[in-house]
Amino acid sequence: MRVLGIDPGLTRCGYGLVEKTGRKPVALSAGVIKTSPDLEVPQRLAEMQAEIRDLLIEAQPTVVAIERVLFQVNVSTAMSVGRASGIVMAEAVNAQATVVEYSPNEVKQAVTGWGGASKEQMEQMVKAQLNIDVPLRPVDAADALGLALCHLAHAPTAAAIAKASERGKISS
Amino acid sequence: MRVLGIDPGLTRCGYGLVEKTGRKPVALSAGVIKTSPDLEVPQRLAEMQAEIRDLLIEAQPTVVAIERVLFQVNVSTAMSVGRASGIVMAEAVNAQATVVEYSPNEVKQAVTGWGGASKEQMEQMVKAQLNIDVPLRPVDAADALGLALCHLAHAPTAAAIAKASERGKISS
């Protein structure tokens, strides 16, 4: 199972691709998509859409795990993140991926065992689980890898089904 | 100048296409894009995206005028409308259209002369300006035509520039 975590945003859209075929998950790529702040919002969204589409073609994820916006944010932030996440969702469906959403607390809980973990604790645990010994910068990339790990932790059944289906394909 | 008004939403996305070449604007089409409520949000967004793309290919608008979400709405509504409007914006840019946003009050002010006009007053004025003598149903279509009329009222300069540029293209 290959999971692409995405922390959506117009200014910074973090992504992290994790594959789990054996017992340990492996990070395949991580980074941040940025759009030119000099452009108008619609142009930036179109730019982000093109980048996300390229990323999905390259990554070929089974699942796209997107950060869910919390209700504590203000309306302006919700609108802005909504615009970016709507585009990610539609493009993920177009790329035949399953879309799931997790809140920041669910990600922290799944990755560190504690919903109130700090950014530093999250980064440490993401690095430990993925056997990465360099700093994960920018932090959006670490968050996105955390989203992918969260899905792998939450979906053992889904993973088992996907694996069984892949074995089916190979043997048929 | 051909303006496509869009009142974005996942459940109901109103659209109205208005052309103004001479003195009077003419309605070319209006309607509502709906997505299946039985589907998950990402699937519905992908469905809406495909419909919007088809609509833009057919309508060939110079400008897409989108309803701006007010800050009075709650975070959940802002997220939901944000998702739909983000997709509309990106697709409009992909279709080479200029994207503009107007608040409901700006539309009411431009179409009826009063920012506090009722839905009924809006519909009456949209029908009068476009010389339509049948009821505009559903109401989302009237709202979308109102957005297009609002842009035509707000942008005499933009219209003049676009017209001059079109004349330039024809004569060259």
Image (cartoon, coloured by chain):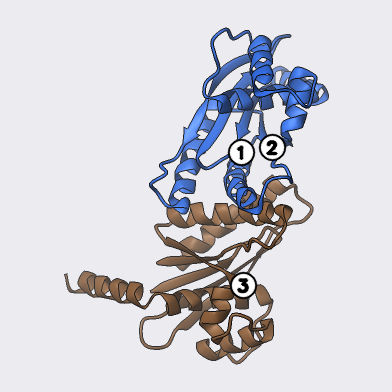
Chain colours: A brown, B blue
CB atoms at circles 1 and 2 under 8 Å apart? yes
Q: Position of residue B142 (x, y in %)?
A: 60, 22
Q: Badge 3: how crowded within 10 Å, few (<14), some, or many (20+)?
A: many
- C-alpha gap between disc 1 and disc 2: 7 Å
Dot 1 corresponds to which residue? B92
Q: CA distance from mark 3 to mark 2?
A: 29 Å
Confirm whether circles 1 and 2 share one chain: yes
Query: What is the total number of numbered labels drawn onto the structure image?
Result: 3
The amino acid type found where label 1 is placed reads Ala
x and y percentages locating residue B125 in the rendered image: 69, 14
The chain letter under disc 3 is A
Dot 1 and dot 3 within a common chain:
no
Q: Amino acid at mark 3?
A: Gly
Q: Position of residue A162 (x, y in %)?
A: 31, 71
- Element under disc 3: strand
Give the residue at x 77% y 56%: A37
Residue at 79%, 22% (x, y): give it: B114
Relative placement, left or right, of B110 versus A165 is right
Query: Marks 3 and 2: CB-CB under 8 Å?
Result: no
Q: Secondary structure at mark 2?
A: strand
Looking at the image, residue B147 sits to the left or right of residue A27; the answer is right
**Whole-Å distance between the Cαs marked 1 and 3?**
27 Å
Residue wearing tag 2: B99
Does residue B165 show up? no
- Kindly identify which residue carries mark 3: A31
Residue B43 on image: x %, y %: 43, 50
